[in-house]
Image: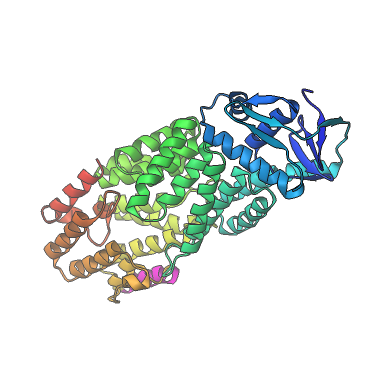
């Protein structure tokens, strides 16, 4: 018996089609566990050594006895749920396992409905993933529902959990600029990402998803685990650009540059990878390199106003800030106005980017002495994000407190704006130096060299200490 369909108890196992069913209805079993069950059923009545079962389930991947024991435990639970009075898998101490229930070979022909049921979870994953890659909030909501149903249908399928984890973290991302971000969705994302890793510890996608989720928590301790999980993902599957891009998103300095460059090697022209690299060059005050990265990203498809797969955003905004820092006000304004057009497309980060862009436009008008236009632009920023600390400070409004959803660095930045607008530049620089001295490793204050109201390039001696600290952090 090397293939075909086999009956035992109320079950039928189609080895070739990789399907376990009861009364024609599919039973959810993860792929590796189904391979172990098939090996046992094909050798029914005989002892199957543990090494043979590990080879059947994991091929050439090195795993320990614990993975096999978990697979056997899961199979026993699944089978017992539908045939509680029947024993199926016997443990033979120090030798292996034996399938002890009577097994018979049957002839069967799948119905269209049964075939559709087999395809449904995989179809859902493909469709759900495409929706997530659009970065469109409406499609993310649809993908969330798809993966919730997939987890209900196949609770032992790692890909269903990692899809749901990704959808949940994207739901959180749509709220991260709000006074009360949806941290419940972030916690849910972490639970499902960890479950995916437990179900399939050799899945690079599962570890990459866990790493990305942990990276969004803002907890420095979690960032260590985030990088470790993504390093594991890139080791398991080094040719997948998504893992390297996610690693770039949770790392900083040289690590981010290397991850972004690896992403570009695997997905040439990726606008988002170009943006990641540019952020490090900005922190290092290598503005020409940063501008080159952004221009390359825009020429590769980052200048789209229509929704696209892996939709890019914020490239014009950052290039506008760089040009403003370099004294090119006309070029800066053209970039910032273009960013407003680009951020009109549905995108997870469109609201946040539009707010930052209106703030930058307001700062540019302020430099020109156009106070009425500046005020109008700052107000537009607050329409997008009412807590925007820099726009609030520029308008003379009180900064939001931690209880109102502001981070410590946001509050320091708001107070720095107040000092700059009062002409107290040395005090402003000391505020940022103090914040950087206390900040954990990472990208804190990376925008300082191009912050439009700080205008550090106009007073390099005053800001030299803060800029040196920033370069060191980005090394």
Residue 247 in magenta stretch: no
Q: Which residue is drawn at 29% across and 49% down?
A: 442
Regarding residue 250, the answer to whether it shows in the image is: yes
* Front one among 97 and 327: 97
Among the 4 quarters of the image, the one containing residue 296: top left
In the image, residue 282 lies at what x, y percent?
A: 28, 46
Residue 208 to residue 4: above or below = below
Among the 4 quarters of the image, the one containing residue 113: top right
Q: In which quarter of the image is the C terminus?
A: top left
Regarding residue 308, the answer to whether it shows in the image is: no
* Front one among 276 and 152: 152
Residues in magenta, as a range:
372-384
In the image, residue 97 lies at what x, y percent?
A: 65, 30
Tally of marks: 0
Q: Residue at x 45, y 47 (%)?
A: 212
Q: In which quarter of the image is the N terminus?
A: top right
* Front one among 297 and 145: 145
In this view, the residue farthest toward the front is: 93
Residue 188 to residue 415: above or below = above
In this view, the residue farthest toward the bottom is: 397
Residue 117 to residue 351: above or below = above
The reply, left or right, for residue 196 in relation to residue 424 is right
In the image, residue 24 lies at what x, y percent?
A: 83, 44
Q: Residue at x 57, y 27 (%)?
A: 94
Residue 373 in magenta stretch: yes
- Considering the whole magenta stretch, tell me its main secondary structure: helix
Q: Which residue is drawn at 41% across and 37% down?
A: 231
In the image, residue 265 lies at what x, y percent?
A: 44, 30
The reply, left or right, for residue 25 in relation to residue 263 is right
Q: Looking at the image, what colour scheme do you see?
A: rainbow
């Amino acid at each position: 018996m090397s293939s075909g369909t086999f009956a035992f108890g109320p079950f039928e196992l189609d080895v070739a089609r990789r399907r376990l069913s009861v009364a024609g209805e599919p039973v959810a079993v993860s792929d590796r566990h189904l391979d172990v069950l098939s090996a046992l059923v094909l050798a029914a009545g005989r002892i199957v050594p543990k090494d043979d079962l590990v080879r059947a389930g994991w091929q050439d991947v090195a795993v320990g006895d614990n993975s096999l024991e978990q697979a056997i435990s899961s199979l026993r639970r699944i089978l017992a749920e539908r045939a509680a009075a029947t024993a199926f898998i016997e443990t033979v101490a120090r030798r292996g396992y034996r399938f002890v229930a009577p097994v018979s070979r049957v002839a069967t022909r799948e119905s269209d409905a049964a075939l559709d049921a087999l395809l449904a979870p995989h179809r859902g994953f493909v469709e759900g993933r495409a929706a997530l890659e659009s970065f469109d909030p409406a499609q993310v909501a649809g993908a969330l529902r798809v993966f919730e149903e997939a987890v209900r249908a196949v609770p032992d399928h790692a890909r269903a959990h990692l899809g749901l984890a990704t959808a949940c973290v994207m739901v959180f991302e749509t709220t991260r600029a709000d006074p009360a971000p949806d941290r419940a969705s972030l916690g849910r994302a972490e639970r499902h990402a960890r479950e995916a890793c437990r179900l399939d510890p050799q899945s690079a996608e599962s570890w990459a998803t866990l790493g990305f989720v942990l990276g969004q928590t803002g907890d420095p301790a979690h960032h260590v685990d985030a990088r470790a999980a993504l390093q594991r993902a890139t080791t398991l599957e080094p040719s997948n650009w998504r893992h390297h891009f996610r690693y770039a998103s949770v790392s900083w300095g040289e690590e981010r540059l290397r991850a972004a460059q690896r992403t570009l090697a695997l997905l040439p022209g990726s606008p988002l990878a170009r943006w990641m690299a540019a952020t490090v060059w900005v922190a290092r005050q290598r503005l020409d390199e940063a501008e080159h990265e952004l221009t390359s990203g825009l020429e590769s498809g980052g200048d789209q106003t229509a929704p696209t797969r892996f939709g890019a955003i914020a490239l014009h905004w950052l290039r506008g800030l760089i040009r403003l820092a370099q004294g090119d006000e006309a070029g800066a304004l053209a970039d910032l106005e273009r960013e407003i057009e680009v951020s009109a497309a549905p995108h997870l980060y469109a609201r946040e980017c539009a707010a930052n862009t209106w703030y930058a436009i307001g700062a540019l008008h302020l430099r020109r002495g156009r106070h009425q236009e500046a005020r109008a632009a700052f107000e537009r920023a607050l329409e997008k994000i009412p807590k925007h600390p820099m726009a609030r400070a520029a308008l003379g409004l009180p900064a939001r407190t931690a209880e109102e959803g502001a981070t410590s660095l946001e509050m320091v930045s708001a107070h720095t704006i107040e000092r700059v607008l009062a002409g107290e530049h040395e005090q402003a620089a000391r505020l940022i130096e103090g914040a950087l001295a206390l900040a954990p490793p990472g990208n804190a204050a990376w925008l300082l060299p191009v912050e439009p109201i700080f205008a550090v390039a106009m007073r390099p001696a005053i800001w030299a200490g803060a800029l040196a600290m920033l370069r060191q952090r980005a090394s």
